[in-house]
Protein backbone atom coordinates (compact mmCIF):
# COMPACT_ATOMS: atom_id res chain seq x y z
CA UNK A 1 0.00 0.00 0.00
CA UNK A 2 2.74 2.38 0.87
CA UNK A 3 4.19 1.93 -2.62
CA UNK A 4 0.79 2.46 -4.27
CA UNK A 5 0.21 5.70 -2.33
CA UNK A 6 3.67 6.89 -3.25
CA UNK A 7 3.04 6.11 -6.93
CA UNK A 8 -0.26 8.04 -6.88
CA UNK A 9 1.40 11.03 -5.20
CA UNK A 10 4.25 11.02 -7.73
CA UNK A 11 1.78 10.81 -10.66
CA UNK A 12 -0.22 13.68 -9.17
CA UNK A 13 2.93 15.80 -8.77
CA UNK A 14 4.00 15.13 -12.37
CA UNK A 15 0.53 16.02 -13.60
CA UNK A 16 0.52 19.21 -11.52
CA UNK A 17 3.94 20.32 -12.83
CA UNK A 18 2.88 19.55 -16.42
CA UNK A 19 -0.25 21.68 -16.06
CA UNK A 20 1.71 24.56 -14.52
CA UNK A 21 4.29 24.45 -17.32
CA UNK A 22 1.62 24.38 -20.02
CA UNK A 23 -0.18 27.30 -18.41
CA UNK A 24 3.05 29.31 -18.07
CA UNK A 25 3.97 28.64 -21.70
CA UNK A 26 0.58 29.90 -22.82
CA UNK A 27 0.87 33.07 -20.73
CA UNK A 28 4.31 34.08 -21.92
CA UNK A 29 3.87 33.47 -25.63
CA UNK A 30 3.12 36.42 -27.87
CA UNK A 31 0.13 36.39 -30.11
CA UNK A 32 0.09 38.27 -33.43
CA UNK A 33 -3.57 39.12 -32.85
CA UNK A 34 -2.54 41.45 -30.01
CA UNK A 35 -0.13 43.54 -32.04
CA UNK A 36 -1.29 46.73 -33.68
CA UNK A 37 -0.40 46.96 -37.36
CA UNK A 38 1.37 50.14 -38.39
CA UNK A 39 -0.77 52.61 -40.28
CA UNK A 40 0.26 53.75 -43.71
CA UNK A 41 1.22 57.40 -43.83
CA UNK A 42 2.09 60.11 -46.33
CA UNK A 43 5.64 61.37 -45.56
CA UNK A 44 4.74 64.72 -47.15
CA UNK A 45 2.08 65.46 -44.53
CA UNK A 46 2.79 63.13 -41.58
CA UNK A 47 5.01 63.60 -38.56
CA UNK A 48 5.99 60.49 -36.62
CA UNK A 49 6.24 61.11 -32.89
CA UNK A 50 8.07 58.86 -30.44
CA UNK A 51 10.27 58.93 -27.34
CA UNK A 52 13.34 59.82 -29.43
CA UNK A 53 11.66 62.84 -31.04
CA UNK A 54 9.75 63.67 -34.18
CA UNK A 55 10.43 62.74 -37.78
CA UNK A 56 10.76 64.94 -39.72
CA UNK A 57 11.78 67.67 -37.25
CA UNK A 58 10.74 70.33 -39.79
CA UNK A 59 7.82 69.91 -42.19
CA UNK A 60 6.97 72.41 -44.95
CA UNK A 61 3.40 72.39 -46.28
CA UNK A 62 1.11 74.70 -48.22
CA UNK A 63 -1.81 76.57 -46.68
CA UNK A 64 -4.90 74.33 -46.45
CA UNK A 65 -2.95 71.09 -45.96
CA UNK A 66 -3.90 68.72 -43.15
CA UNK A 67 -0.91 67.50 -41.16
CA UNK A 68 -1.08 64.20 -39.27
CA UNK A 69 0.95 63.31 -36.18
CA UNK A 70 1.25 59.53 -35.69
CA UNK A 71 2.42 58.10 -32.36
CA UNK A 72 4.92 55.32 -33.10
CA UNK A 73 5.85 54.71 -29.48
CA UNK A 74 4.51 52.51 -26.69
CA UNK A 75 4.43 55.62 -24.47
CA UNK A 76 1.70 58.16 -24.96
CA UNK A 77 2.42 61.62 -26.37
CA UNK A 78 0.57 64.84 -27.06
CA UNK A 79 1.03 67.55 -29.66
CA UNK A 80 0.61 71.21 -28.72
CA UNK A 81 1.51 74.41 -30.51
CA UNK A 82 3.92 76.75 -28.77
CA UNK A 83 2.85 80.18 -27.56
CA UNK A 84 2.59 82.87 -30.23
CA UNK A 85 1.87 80.40 -33.04
CA UNK A 86 -0.51 81.86 -35.66
CA UNK A 87 -3.21 79.26 -34.86
CA UNK A 88 -3.14 77.28 -31.59
CA UNK A 89 -3.76 73.53 -31.51
CA UNK A 90 -3.53 70.73 -28.95
CA UNK A 91 -4.14 67.00 -29.26
CA UNK A 92 -5.56 64.62 -26.71
CA UNK A 93 -3.14 61.95 -25.46
CA UNK A 94 -2.03 59.76 -28.37
CA UNK A 95 -1.20 56.14 -27.77
CA UNK A 96 0.62 53.71 -30.06
CA UNK A 97 -0.61 54.00 -33.65
CA UNK A 98 -3.10 56.79 -32.84
CA UNK A 99 -3.06 60.04 -34.75
CA UNK A 100 -3.97 63.70 -34.47
CA UNK A 101 -4.71 65.91 -37.47
CA UNK A 102 -4.72 69.67 -37.92
CA UNK A 103 -5.51 71.66 -41.05
CA UNK A 104 -3.31 74.73 -41.39
CA UNK A 105 -5.26 77.67 -42.82
CA UNK A 106 -2.97 80.49 -41.70
CA UNK A 107 0.53 80.75 -43.25
CA UNK A 108 3.42 81.02 -40.82
CA UNK A 109 5.85 79.08 -38.69
CA UNK A 110 4.41 76.75 -36.06
CA UNK A 111 6.58 75.30 -33.35
CA UNK A 112 5.07 72.40 -31.43
CA UNK A 113 6.00 70.10 -28.57
CA UNK A 114 4.82 67.12 -26.53
CA UNK A 115 3.30 68.39 -23.27
CA UNK A 116 4.48 65.24 -21.46
CA UNK A 117 8.05 65.58 -22.74
CA UNK A 118 8.86 69.15 -23.92
CA UNK A 119 12.20 67.93 -25.34
CA UNK A 120 10.14 66.28 -28.10
CA UNK A 121 9.48 69.16 -30.46
CA UNK A 122 9.35 70.19 -34.08
CA UNK A 123 8.42 72.91 -36.56
CA UNK A 124 5.87 73.24 -39.33
CA UNK A 125 6.26 75.95 -41.95
CA UNK A 126 3.03 76.78 -43.75
CA UNK A 127 3.50 78.51 -47.10
CA UNK A 128 0.83 80.88 -48.49
Image (tube, grey):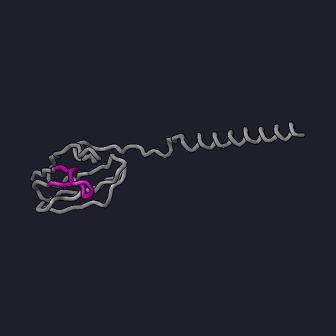
Q: How many marks?
A: 0
Asked whether residue 33 is drawn in magenta, I would say no
Point out the residue furthest to the front here. Answer: 2
Q: Is residue 23 left or right of residue 8?
A: left
- The image position of residue 91, as x and y in percent, is 27, 60
Residue 25 appears in which quarter of the rendering? top right
Please provide the residue range marked out in magenta.
111-122
Q: Quick one: quadrant of the N terminus?
A: top right
Picture coordinates of residue 78 (x, y %)? 28, 56
> At 21% from the left edge and 61% from the top edge, which residue is drawn?
89
| Residue occupying image coordinates x 18% and y 63% | 88
Of 42 and 21, which appears nearest the observer? 21
Residue 26 in the image: above or below residue 75: above
Picture quadrant where residue 94 is located? bottom left
Q: Nearer the viewer, residue 84 or 119?
A: 119
**Extreme residue in the right direction:** 1
Residue depicted at x 23% and y 43%:
55
Task: Establish if 78 lies above or below 14.
Answer: below
Tell me if 39 is positioned left or right of 90 in this view. Answer: right
- Is residue 114 one of those drawn in magenta? yes
Q: Residue at x 15, y 50 (%)?
A: 123
Q: Nearer the viewer, residue 12 or 58?
A: 12
- Residue 38 appears at what percent x and percent y? 38, 43
Q: Is residue 88 left or right of residue 78?
A: left
Where residue 62 sits in the image (x, y, percent)?
A: 14, 50
Amino acid sequence: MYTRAREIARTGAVLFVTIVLLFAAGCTGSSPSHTTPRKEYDPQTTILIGSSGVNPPVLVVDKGVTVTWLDTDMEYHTVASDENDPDAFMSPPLFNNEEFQWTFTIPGTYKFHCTENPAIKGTIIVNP
